[in-house]
Image: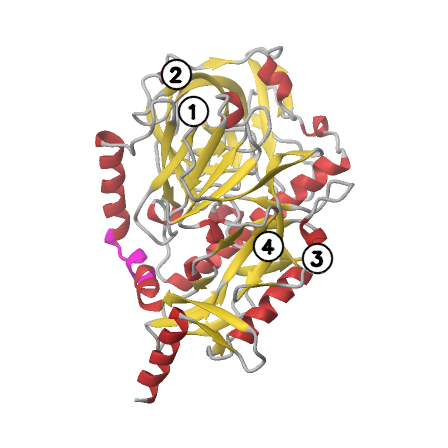
Amino acid sequence: MAFSLFFLFLSLLSLSTTTTTAGTPTTTATLDVATTVQKTLDLLNPNFLQQQSDKTQKTSSESRPKTTSSSLSFTVHPRSSIHNHHNDYESLTRARLARDSHRVNSVITNIDISISGTNRSEMKPVVESNSMYKVEDLSTPVTSGISQGSGEYFARVGLGTPAKEYYMVIDTGSDITWLQCQPCSDCYQQTDTIYDPSGSSSYNSLPCGSQQCQALETSACRSTGCLYQVSYGDGSFTVGDFATETVSFGNSGSVPSVAIGCGHDNEGLFVGSAGLLALGGGPLSLPSQIKATSFSYCLVDRDSDKSSTLEFNSAPPAGSVTAPLLRNPKVKTYLYVGLTGISVGGRPLSIPPSIFAVDDSGRGGAIVDSGTAVTRLQRQAYNSLRDAFTQQARNLKPTDGFSLFDTCYDFSSLTRVAVPTVGFNFAGGKTLSLRPENYLIPVDSNGKFCLAFAPTDSPLSIIGNVQQQGTRVGYDISKSVVSFSPSNC
């Protein structure tokens, strides 16, 4: 009886605004604990991957999401529906968080390199006499979990003539699209067969004097043409031939002569995928090369077997929450957003807006990143968020922290629970209210949930893909606007 009354009380909280003893209004929302936990169990079902594979093949061969005549579209799938070898959800979560930590370190390192003015020509590929591709030993090797792979969402991309489809990580934090190519001197495991340029009539090596080769930050030349190299901040890299190829967007169209990296030596990351689809702000990213005025994606729940779309030149849904799309003059790649604050329980936190601004040196600011999972906030902002949340969630049962999470709760005896709301405040006065599933996530299949934010000592804030799940995120490049459309996958 006591449990029933407690659950009824929490349910009423989810439907109304109550007042604390101090007279402060607190807005709550309902988290469906039972459904979320069931998804973690379904994901571990041995039949899950096969069912998803069948769905993907049907989507690829029979139907694609409808787009306008001027738009292009890929399907997007969560990583775990394509490549998952974990037997329990806790180990899967730890692997995800390990990948995420390396991703964040890579982003911060790349920004530091750009701001410091490091001469990237020092990192050019080296070709030895036996024609094998090597990368210069630029720093102390990093021993880490990068062999577990990176990237949480894959697009299904058509390449070559005739077109063959490949799973490629979508990455708003990269400018060079690349995939593993035959012959491979060193390639990691991927789901699809490795791309063979000899089987495509539209593959063409780029000469060293080409505009695309000259636009590379790290390149070299040999008799067969331009070589590229992309080095990531966690010690991973890809190196090979820079070429052009036809890119196909399902049944919505194709674009010829897109510059891509044909990687013959790829070490340390993206296990499961064939390569990376670059959506950054540089001149060689896919949106820049196809002259897209806008692009958008919707990331389904990472534990789901559903898929969504990555679209180019499609109109944003009506009723979107908008924010300024900002550019950092010293860092072209990353997509910055005009974040000004955070709200908990419907009330803005006391965080100076300067916390989220780019300073004169080019450091700081807030980026929206498809490759980072958990949102990172400067420690002052994180502490303010955590303290406000725990204050307003005193009725929830706390439990020990987990990995990089220090605020966790035991929902094992509940099917639904009322939790404080969380929202992002943007320049212009708009607020994006997050679903509870966007900030309280399961870390095992036993009802342990954690507040999915983490502190960082870097001045950079990162809005990660956990907070983007279930929301169509659009980048209007021509108008410098970012749009967020909840429940629009």
Query: Disc 2 to disc 1, how far (Cα)?
Result: 9 Å
Q: Amino acid at mark 3?
A: Pro
Q: Nearer the viewer, mark 4 or mark 3?
A: 3
Q: CA distance from mark 1 to mark 4?
A: 38 Å
| Residue segment shown in magenta | 40-47
If you read the primary sequence from the N terminus, does the residue marked by circle 2 or circle 1 appear first?
1
**For mark 4, what is the residue?**
376
Please determine whether, in this image, residue 36 is positioned above or below residue 334: below
Which circle, 2 or 4, is nearer the viewer?
Answer: 4
- Residue 143 in view (yes/no): no
Q: Amino acid at mark 4?
A: Arg
Contact (CB < 8 A) between labels 1 and 4?
no
Q: Residue 376 versus residue 205: which sits nearer the camera?
A: 376
Image side of residue 19 versus residue 62, left or right:
right
Q: Which mark is residue 182?
A: 1
- Count neighbours of disc 4 (C-alpha within 10 A) and say few if under 14, some if 14 to 19, many if 20 or more: many
In the rendering, which numbered label is found on residue 352?
3
Residue pointed to by mark 2: 198
Q: Main secondary structure of the magenta part?
A: helix
Query: Which residue is depicted at the point 38% across and 80% down?
Result: 9
